[in-house]
Image (spheres, rainbow, N blue to C red):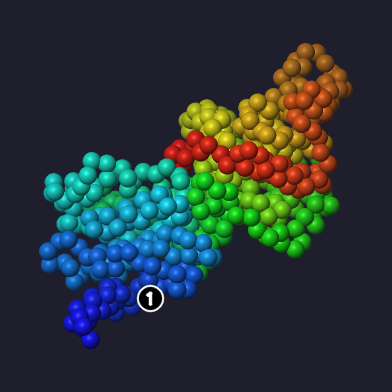
Amino acid sequence: MPFERELEELARRKQAALEMGGREKVERQHQAGRLTARERIGKLLDPGSFLEIGLLNCSDVPGMEDRSPTDSKICGYGEIDRRQVVVSANDFTVLSATSSRVAGKKEGEAKRVAEDWGYPLVYLAEAGGARMPDIMGSIGLASFGGGGFDTFLQRYSRVRRAPMVTAIMGQSWGMPTWMGCLADFVVQIKGSAWGVSGPRVVSLALSESVTEEELGGWKVHAEMTGMTDAVAETEDECFDLIRMYLGYMPAHCDELPPEAEVPEGSGLKMADILNRLPEKRNRAYDMHRLLRCIVDEDSLFPLKGRFGRSVITALARVAGRVIGIVANQPLEQGGAMDTDGIDKVTSFLCLCDSFNVPLVFFHDIPGFMVGKPAERKRVAAKVINYVNALALVSVPKISIIVRKTYGMAYWNMCGSGAGPDFHVAWPSAEMSFVDPEIAAQVVYGGKGLDEEQLKAKTREMIENASPYGAAGRHYIQDVIDPRETRDYIAHALKISQGSRSRGIGRHELANWPTKF
C-alpha cells in the first residue's frame, strides 16, 4: 500500500495520544472515583458526534513531547441532544492537566470559535494551575499570555455571545477557576474544589494549613460565594444538569431559546393555587409551591438555590416557552433581600438579557435587609448596581405582585417606572413605601391616639396599600385572578415574542461582571 510507513506512524502517534497519561495514571483516576477526560466527553456528548482538534499536540519544552499527549487538554466539537457545542476537557492523567503555552493556545481557539460561530462552550475542569517550570522566567511568563499584545485578554475576558458552562469535576486550581468565573453556569460535584491556588501553594506562600474543601469545596461556593450555580452528587448527575441547562439556552445571542412540548399535567394545579397562599398577610409560605403551579410540569430549574436564599432565580417554561424567574421567598428572612440576594439577581439579569430569556418577577418583598451588617456589605451600592442592570435589560419583562412590595425593593423587582412590559397584581397585593403597620406607628404613634384609634389608622393604611388604587390610575395594568396567572404569562410571552424585536434584546449587559 502506498505511504504504508507514514500511515503506520500516524496511527502510532494517534494511539499514543488516545492512551492519555498511560494505564497507570488512568487507573489512578478511576481509583479516585473519577472518570478520565475522554470518558467524560463520551458520556456528555451524543454518541459518535465528537470531532477532536489538537489530538497530536504536545508540550513545546524539549524532551517533554512523549510525556504530554494532547498537552493535557482535549478539545473539539460535538453535539448534546443533537445541538452543536464546543467542548474543552482537562486531562488530569497528563501532568495533572496543568496549563501551558500549547494547551492555552488550543483552549483559546476553542473559546474563540464558540463565540464567533455561536456554539455553547462546555469546559470540563479538573486541573492543577500553571505548569512549572515551563512558565518561569521572563520568556515563560510573557509567552504564557499567548505571545501577542491582546492574546491574554482574548482568553481571560468574555462578552456573552454564546452560552458557556464550566463543570468542576475534581481539584481545579488556576485556569479552571478563571473559566468558572467566566462561565454563565457552574456545576460542581461534591468532593471537588476550585480556587485561585491549591492548598500546597497556600501553605508555602502563607504558612497556612488549609484543606481543599475549606479553600473551595462545594459548600464554600454554593452557599458562601455564590459562584457555583448547581451541585451534583455524581458525574452522571453533573452531565444531566449540563444538558438540562443548555436545553433552556439558545445556541447564541441572536436567537430565542428553544421551545419545547408542553408536558402533560402542566397548569392543572392552577385551580388550587390559592390554597398555597396564606390568607393571613404576614404568614410565611414557600414561593416554590406557587411557581410549580404556574410553570410547565417539572420545568423549574433553580440557579444558585443555596445562595441568597430569600430570592429565587430560576429558569422554567410556560406553555413551552423559556422564562427567567425572579421571585421573593418569604420562608427566608421574610423575603427581605440581602446583599447576596442582590448579587444573585443582578447576575441572573445579565444571563437572561444576554440570551433573550424573558423575565418574570413575582413580588412578595418587605424591602432590603438594612442595619450595620448590611451597610458594611455596601447594600446601598449594590441596590443601585441592581437598578442600573435592570435599566439595561431589554428582553420582555412581566411583573406580578403576589403579596407585599414595599419601598425601593418594589422598583428593583421591576415595578412601575422600572421598565415592565406587563405589570399586574393579585388582589392579595399590598403596595406601599413601608409595611402599613409600621407606617401607622411612625405616623401616628405618640400622637395621643388610643388603641382603637391607632388600629383604625392602621386598617386605613392597609386599605390604601390595596392594588386597586394603582390600577385605577394606570400605574399597574390590571389586577388579575391568581388562577389566571399562567394564562396571562403565556399570552404576554406570545405577544412580546411576536413583536418586531421577536423578544431578542440589545444585550447591553453582555460583558457586565457577574461574579460579584
Side of 17 relative to 274 (left or right): left
Residue shown at 18% from the left, 82% from the top: 5
Q: Nearer the viewer, residue 31 or 112?
A: 112
Quadrant location of the N terminus in the rendered image:
bottom left
Horizontal side of residue 87 vs 353, given as left or right: left
Q: Position of residue 16 (x, y in %)?
A: 25, 76
Q: Position of residue 41 (x, y in %)?
A: 42, 68
Regarding mark 1 in the picture, which secondary structure is present there? Answer: helix
Q: Which residue is mark 1?
A: 30
Q: Is residue 31 left or right of residue 427?
A: left
The front one of 371 and 289 is 289
Q: Residue at x 71, y 53 (%)?
A: 319
Q: Is residue 55 above or below residue 151?
A: below
In x, y percent, where is residue 501? 60, 39
Q: Which quarter of the picture shows residue 4?
A: bottom left
The quarter of the rendered structure image containing the C terminus is top left
Callout 1 amino acid: His
Residue at image coords 24%, 65%: 57
Q: Is residue 383 left or right of residue 409?
A: left
Name the spot of residue 94 as percent of width and height, x first: 27, 68
